[in-house]
Image: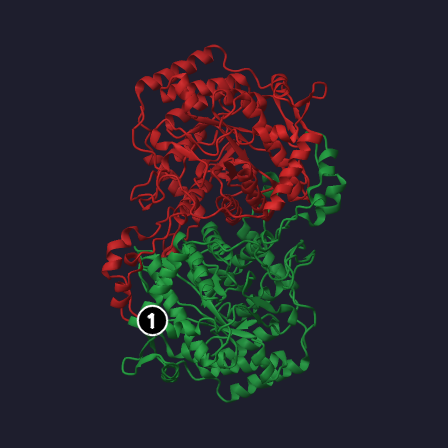
Chain colours: A green, B red
């Protein structure tokens, strides 16, 4: 079923290619980027330890509300202090520490095509599409509620670019599909329009189990192999402060039991759902993440777990969340340190509050990206297309984000400094004040020497004016349209498609899934 | 003459203020940012040494053309191998090494107001305005050739924002002032509309000497004190590859003799004026920078010198220079390492090739800024307002850049992790699922807890739409207009102004300066 091509994340140097899934042909690194840089450190080891200790104190003295009977029973069995009346669970530090280290520091996340397999951990990073936006936007069609057509288009875009490594959820919510069967149609689209690793929402046990089964069918595996090979992930948000709701706990339990990936992401907005200080918000985030870790490892010791962070701040005037702020960047660096402190891969995001794909969207996104990528992020959710603090998936922003992600992948390519590269011969060949255009050193290398952009325009003012004086957002409109026109679906075994179709039909006939409790 | 307030760069924590020079009132850090992060390293120590050795080989075996008789005589006297016929100068590695270490690792650059004094070196960074653009642009007035009115406006903007620390040259060239007297009027404007440190162009001996004299008058100093207190800087560009032209060498000699600051900046575009490889372009840049260093230290041992880098790449299709590219970022990191390798402060830039203040301008600028600021840059020229690869000074881009610079200054503020900041009390006070808006911990801190933006709009889509659905570039137009309306000139001693005026009048009566040879 899979193409059998080797995983691309085994070496530090990656091949270049003149082909790209979409956009104009241009050389750029393919495969998963691996940072050559030591992750940036925001706080000292002692300061980090003080945040870690504060989180342990929160778990011991205050505790977390677990709104799930079975979860509390499981935690009680593991030695936690459970108050059934209040549903509060408290954890001794030793209990928490005993579960740190059970989850793998790094693991492989499998795609339906093994060439799409991802290394999650170490200095590798994987980029995903925007996820969960209720609206979508493009310059021609304007802003509209999520629908299946846009949903499918964003998956096609995600499939088309080598620098998008996974589908991070529903890029936009296809609300024209009834809620009871939405997960079936949506996963069917995801698993047929793309062959990259996917996400499943934790919205009740049936949906989790349906998703696991559909991915198993799509990969053509038996249950045992699926359990050895994590092939989908779910994002678990705590209801900060200090609460885990029923569907989220159900998601942890079902996914962990099958050895699939739990990405625990507290949404700790400083000043709203967390203390107004970054140190306080990080301590609370850490407590909530560790509570999720313990729950996961109690469900199945060794189940893959990713430490997620989404600590940012609110605008204290309006109460609106803000993203890509200086506080967001610092929280990212701190979160990376906390994740490494407990030996876990780290999930971050490419976020902005801007309502349109303008300069603000770009500087907030770049701030988010540098915070993530120099901070040592392993799993970047919402990598391309996010606008409006997550309320909109933008086609043009998607293209601009892909450009930025490709640039980061190129920055991560090591610099070669051997004698041939330095080229003293070329320097001695060109007279002072001359130029290097026609030296042998240049001629041998110029085709692949530099990153070639997707949507940037480097022409001079006159040429740019003559061509319509388009902004990058206007040009991005052309690029996504061209990309969709050139989209080709991944090759699939017809039998797999048929098996997926019949599963979806059977589950629809059964009425789909119950509303989320 | 000066206000007497203390320099603001002595401590790591800086006070916050609710005042700002321009824009809406909002707390943000003032004074000079100091990075809490270790500079990012692109190459290993061995790789760095191999680039350094390649540069020494270039200087020994190929040499540099010095188009200035006195300069060659001075270098010959210092032991360099001078070929008078070809004007080529070659340097033994020992000669170069003997001049490394003579220039200070860090120094103070003085403003006319001592509160504007800058620390150049260590982990301090200073941000300057755009410089040397032949055109300017704003949304209402469009693109036009440089003129004195725009020139003055950009200086007023530079004076108005605390996050702009120096005037980096003529923000836009005032071509409506005749060339022979342009430097006199332009420096007069700079020294009266702003009290921040300034730049002087090296366009012939008379202009350098006039600039030094005008700064001396503006600071109200005698010659000896001016020589103890560097108060202006000049950017020296080599005519890459491997040539230093007459006015540039004159600038080095005159400025260094008076102990003013030489910022040596080879413009080594890989594939055009330098090898197509980054390693080769960096080696050539390093050779040219070291040649300038030796010249400076021969002119006056210990004279302040800044190692500048502007290595980027060209678009191999059009030959156009590109900025803020992945190659540019990597060259920045490498240049920072090379500068530190020879114990010198490092100058970088905030560059973009975009023709308009759109998303491309922002992502290229952010790439440039992160390359500079995480790479350990000390002097950031073209910090605000640069467009079109330097051919245009944009009012709207200026505001967007100031927003980004302010954000970096905030990111550089250390995170406090003591118990009071973490606030376990607040965490225990708020019930699970509740909010922190009204806790004492929040109430005590919310006013100054977060960076407050200059031009970002964090409101939701509906509010933003109702207010006209403006892009950040449109909002920036309002901000710079408001800032200019609120501009107040720095306080000055009337006698100083009068002395400057009479100097300018006398030099004009003498005919100003001769055309550049």
Any part of residue B215 in sight: no
Is A403 situated left or right of B90 in this image?
left
A15 and A465: which is toward the camera: A15
- Residue name at image x 41 percent, y 25 percent: B229
A236 and B301: which is toward the camera: B301
Is B317 situated left or right of B216 in this image?
right
Q: Quadrant of the C terminus of chain B?
A: top right
Rendered view: A219 above or below A17:
below
The image shows residue B344 at horizontal and vertical percentages of 51, 35
Is B302 situated left or right of A241 in this image?
right
Is A354 situated left or right of B319 in this image?
left
- Residue sitting farthest toward the bottom: A510
The image shows residue A484 at horizontal and vertical percentages of 61, 63
Any part of residue B99 in sight: yes
Rendered view: B275 above or below B428:
above
Q: Quadrant of the N terminus of chain B?
A: top left
Rendered view: A287 above or below B312:
below
Residue on which disc 1 sits = A59
Rendered view: A315 above or below B394:
below
The image shows residue B343 at horizontal and vertical percentages of 52, 36
- Residue name at image x 48 percent, y 21 percent: B183
Q: Within 10 Å of the Cα at label 1, are there few (<14), some (14-19), or many (20+) other Cα atoms? A: many
- Residue sitting farthest toward the left: B440
- Residue name at image x 35 percent, y 61 percent: A281
Secondary structure of residue under mark 1: helix
Q: How many marks?
A: 1
Q: Chain of mark 1?
A: A
Q: Which quarter of the picture shows residue A73?
A: bottom left
Q: Which quarter of the picture shows residue B106?
A: top left
A363 and A399: which is toward the camera: A363
- Residue sitting farthest toward the right: A440
């Amino acid at each position: 079923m899979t193409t059998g091509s080797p995983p691309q994340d085994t070496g530090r140097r990656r091949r270049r290619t003149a082909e790209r899934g979409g956009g104009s042909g241009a050389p750029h690194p393919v495969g998963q980027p691996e940072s050559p840089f030591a992750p940036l450190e925001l706080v000292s080891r002692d300061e980090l330890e003080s945040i870690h200790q504060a989180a342990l104190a929160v778990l011991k003295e205050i505790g977390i509300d677990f709104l799930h009977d079975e979860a509390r029973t499981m935690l009680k069995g593991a030695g936690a202090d459970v108050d059934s009346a209040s549903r509060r669970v408290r954890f001794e530090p030793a209990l928490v520490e005993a579960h740190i280290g059970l989850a793998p520091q790094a693991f492989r996340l499998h795609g339906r095509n093994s060439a799409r397999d991802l290394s999650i951990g170490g200095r590798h990073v994987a980029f995903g599409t925007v996820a969960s936006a209720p609206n979508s936007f493009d310059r021609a069609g304007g802003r509209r509620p999520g629908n299946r057509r846009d949903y499918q288009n964003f998956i096609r875009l995600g499939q088309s670019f080598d620098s998008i490594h996974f589908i991070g959820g529903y890029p936009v919510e296809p609300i024209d599909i009834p809620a009871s069967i939405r997960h079936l149609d949506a996963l069917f689209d995801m698993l047929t329009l793309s062959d990259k690793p996917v996400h499943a929402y934790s919205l009740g046990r049936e949906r989790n189990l349906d998703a696991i089964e559909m991915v198993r069918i799509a990969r053509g595996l038996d249950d045992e192999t699926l359990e050895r090979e994590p092939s989908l992930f779910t994002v678990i948000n705590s209801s900060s402060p200090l609460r885990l709701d029923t569907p989220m706990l159900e998601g942890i339990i079902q996914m962990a039991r099958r050895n699939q990936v739990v990405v625990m992401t507290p949404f700790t907005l400083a000043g709203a759902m967390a203390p107004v200080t970054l140190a306080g918000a990080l301590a609370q985030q850490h407590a909530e993440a560790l509570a999720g870790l313990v729950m996961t490892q109690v469900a199945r010791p060794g189940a893959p777990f990713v430490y997620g962070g989404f600590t940012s701040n609110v605008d204290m005037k309006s109460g609106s969340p803000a993203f890509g702020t200086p506080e967001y960047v610092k929280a990212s660096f701190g979160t990376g340190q906390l994740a490494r402190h407990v030996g876990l891969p780290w999930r971050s995001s490419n976020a902005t509050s801007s309502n349109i794909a303008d300069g603000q969207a770009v500087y907030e996104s770049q701030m988010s990206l540098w915070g993530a990528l120099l901070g040592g992020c392993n799993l970047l959710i919402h990598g391309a297309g996010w606008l409006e603090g997550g309320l909109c998936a933008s086609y043009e922003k998607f293209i601009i984000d892909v450009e930025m992600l490709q640039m980061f992948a190129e920055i991560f390519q090591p610099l070669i400094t051997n004698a041939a590269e330095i080229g003293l011969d070329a320097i001695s060949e060109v007279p002072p004040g001359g130029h290097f255009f026609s030296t042998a050193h240049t001629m041998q290398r110029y085709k692949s020497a530099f990153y070639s952009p997707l949507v940037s325009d480097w022409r001079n003012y006159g040429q740019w004016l003559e061509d319509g004086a388009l902004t990058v957002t206007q040009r991005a409109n052309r690029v996504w349209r061209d990309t969709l026109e050139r989209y080709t679906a991944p090759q699939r075994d017809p039998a797999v498609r048929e098996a997926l179709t019949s599963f979806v039909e059977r589950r629809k006939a059964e009425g789909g899934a119950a509303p989320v409790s």
